[in-house]
Image (cartoon, rainbow, N blue to C red):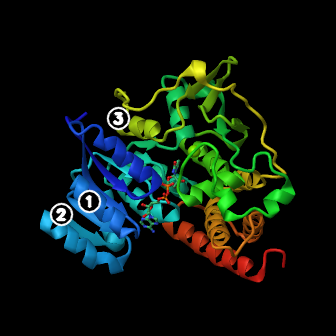
């Protein structure tokens, strides 16, 4: 490993991006920030740029070039906007590792570009793997680029699988907190407001993934993510609710042994793992005090109240572009719910309708994937507009 690890971050103003920077700041002699990119919150972004002094700073929104330039130029930092800027950050020649932490399908292009540029990618952006797993793995392999999970469950699985032979693994067990509606009735869920759905019991995250956690679509996306990362079919990926969020996931071996990974519910743990793998550094963060933990519970999820889990599993089993359609419909429906245009349970209803109509194509080209994504988005918008029950 190089003396100092140079890191580029896609989505630096987000929940994961900001935690990655917080972590990096605690190891000033061992990490340096080479490039930063974000979407639109330019004031927060400019603060980060001034503090971390990357070589390149990029914002997705094209109309923000003037304020970005004004902040960057006096510091000798290159300022860019639009897709070109994101790609430049993703592929910067000086970066050893790229944290992929843009939310949603928008993360796909830059993440693929990072793999093509042979970067080690610390992947938080699960949506890219959900919609284009086949392409991402192909590019990683072709370019000898390492893809390391940041998602806490997959980081746990990666750790449980270190040194194990794949053919000896019986199944993967993803744990889920269950979100704010774990114990709510269907009627309560029907009437749920965004502020209730945004109140996650154990993790503090960006709004989209927080809603995904409330519908359990997050776990559905994670089943697909685990399928690609660990080459495991759907039937061998189980989901268990674990409200304490301390066991981050488990692997059951064929001899009946179950290996689990535990830690505090702090994303900086999995980020540190992905930025330092195969090494392990001394963590500056609070450690798990096992004697002080509450009793650990494991429960089966209620598939009737949380249909998103099976919708995602179904899309994975159909294969091809079905997961891309699922993801696109989910992004639109979650956006609609957050804007007050859709009810909470309209999210699974919209996805179900979009999937029913989707004509899956092979997901082996970006053209097919983007076509499925756009078609599903348009259809989901129409369904929301007309009213889901119509
Ligand atoms: P967030 O909403 O807090 O942050 C998203 C980041 O992406 C921001 O920096 C935003 O500016 C940027 N962004 C949004 N749209 C963009 C676009 N079109 N182009 C460029 N940049 C854009 O989200 P988050 O919670 O940090 O999640 C990021 C990703 O990590 C998601 O895929 C999520 O599922 C995954 N993840 C998050 C957590 C968590 O604890 N927050 C845990 C596991 C996985
Ligand atoms: Mg997760």
Q: Residue 83 appears in which quarter of the rendering?
A: bottom left
In the image: residue 60, left or right of residue 250: left
Q: Residues within 10 Å of mark 2 (few under 14, many from 20)?
A: some
Judged left or right of residue 146, residue 76 is left
Q: Which mark is residue 49?
A: 1
Q: CA distance from mark 2 to mark 3?
A: 26 Å
Cα–Cα gap, marks 1 and 3? 23 Å
Q: Secondary structure at mark 3?
A: helix
Residue 176 is situated, as x and y percent measured from the top left of the image, at: 66, 41
Query: Does any atom of ligand 1 lie closer than 8 Å to the CB of label 2?
Result: no
Q: Which residue is mark 3?
A: 276
Does 343 appear above or below 162? below
Give the mark nearer the N terminus: 2 vs 1.
1
Q: Report helix, strand or loop for mark 1.
A: helix
Residue 330 picture quarter: bottom right
> If you read the primary sequence from the N terminus, does the residue marked by circle 1 or circle 3 appear first?
1
Q: Nearer the viewer, mark 2 or mark 3?
A: 2
Can I make out residue 283 in this image? yes
Residue 92: image location, x then y, percent: 25, 56
- In the displayed structure, 309 sits above or below 63; it is above
Q: Decide if residue 87 is in sight here.
A: no
Q: CA distance from mark 2 to mark 1?
A: 9 Å
**Structural crowding at the residue carrying mark 1, measured as other residues with C-alpha within 10 Å and reported as few (<14), some (14–19) or many (≥20):** many
Q: Sort mark 3 into few (<14), some (14-19) or many (20+) by Cα contacts within 10 Å.
A: some
Mark drawn on residue 77: 2
Residue 69 percent across, percent down from the top left: 22, 73
Q: Which residue lies at the image location 69% right of the left edge and 35% below the top edge?
A: 242
In the shown orientation, is residue 27 left or right of residue 163? left
């Amino acid at each position: 490993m190089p003396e100092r690890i140079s890191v580029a971050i896609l989505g630096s103003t987000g929940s994961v991006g900001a935690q990655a920077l917080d972590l990096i700041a605690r190891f000033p002699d061992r990490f340096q920030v080479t490039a930063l990119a974000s979407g639109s919150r330019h004031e927060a972004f400019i603060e980060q740029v001034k503090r971390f002094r990357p070589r390149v700073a990029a914002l997705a929104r094209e109309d923000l070039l003037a304020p970005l330039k004004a902040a960057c130029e006096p510091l000798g930092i290159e300022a860019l906007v639009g897709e070109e800027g994101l790609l430049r950050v993703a592929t910067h020649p000086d970066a050893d590792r790229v944290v992929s932490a843009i939310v949603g399908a928008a993360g796909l292009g830059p993440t693929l570009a990072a793999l093509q540029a042979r970067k080690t990618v610390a992947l938080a952006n699960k949506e890219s793997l959900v919609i284009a797993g086949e392409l991402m793995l192909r590019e990683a392999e072709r370019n000898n680029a390492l893809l390391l999970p940041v998602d806490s469950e997959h980081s746990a699985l990666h750790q449980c699988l270190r040194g194990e032979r794949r053919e000896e693994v019986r199944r993967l067990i993803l744990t889920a907190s269950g979100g704010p509606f774990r114990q709510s009735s269907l009627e309560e869920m029907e009437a749920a407001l965004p502020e209730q759905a945004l109140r996650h019991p154990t993790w503090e995250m960006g709004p989209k993934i927080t809603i995904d956690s409330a519908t359990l679509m997050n776990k559905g996306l994670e089943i697909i993510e685990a399928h690609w990362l660990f080459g495991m079919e759907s039937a061998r990926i189980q989901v268990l609710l674990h409200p304490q969020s301390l066991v981050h996931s488990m692997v059951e071996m064929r001899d009946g042994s179950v290996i689990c990974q535990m830690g505090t519910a702090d994303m900086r743990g999995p980020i540190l793992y992905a930025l330092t793998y195969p090494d392990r550094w001394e963590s500056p963060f609070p450690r798990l005090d096992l004697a002080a933990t509450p009793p650990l519970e494991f429960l089966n999820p209620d598939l009737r109240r949380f249909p998103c889990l099976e919708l995602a599993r179904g899309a994975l089993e159909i294969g091809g572009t079905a997961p891309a359609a699922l993801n696109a419909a989910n992004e639109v429906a979650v956006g609609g719910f957050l804007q007050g245009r859709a009810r909470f349970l309209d999210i699974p209803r919209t996805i179900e309708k979009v999937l029913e109509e989707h004509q899956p194509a092979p997901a082996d080209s970006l053209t097919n994937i983007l076509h499925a994504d756009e078609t599903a988005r348009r259809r989901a918008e129409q369904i929301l507009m007309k009213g889901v029950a119509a």
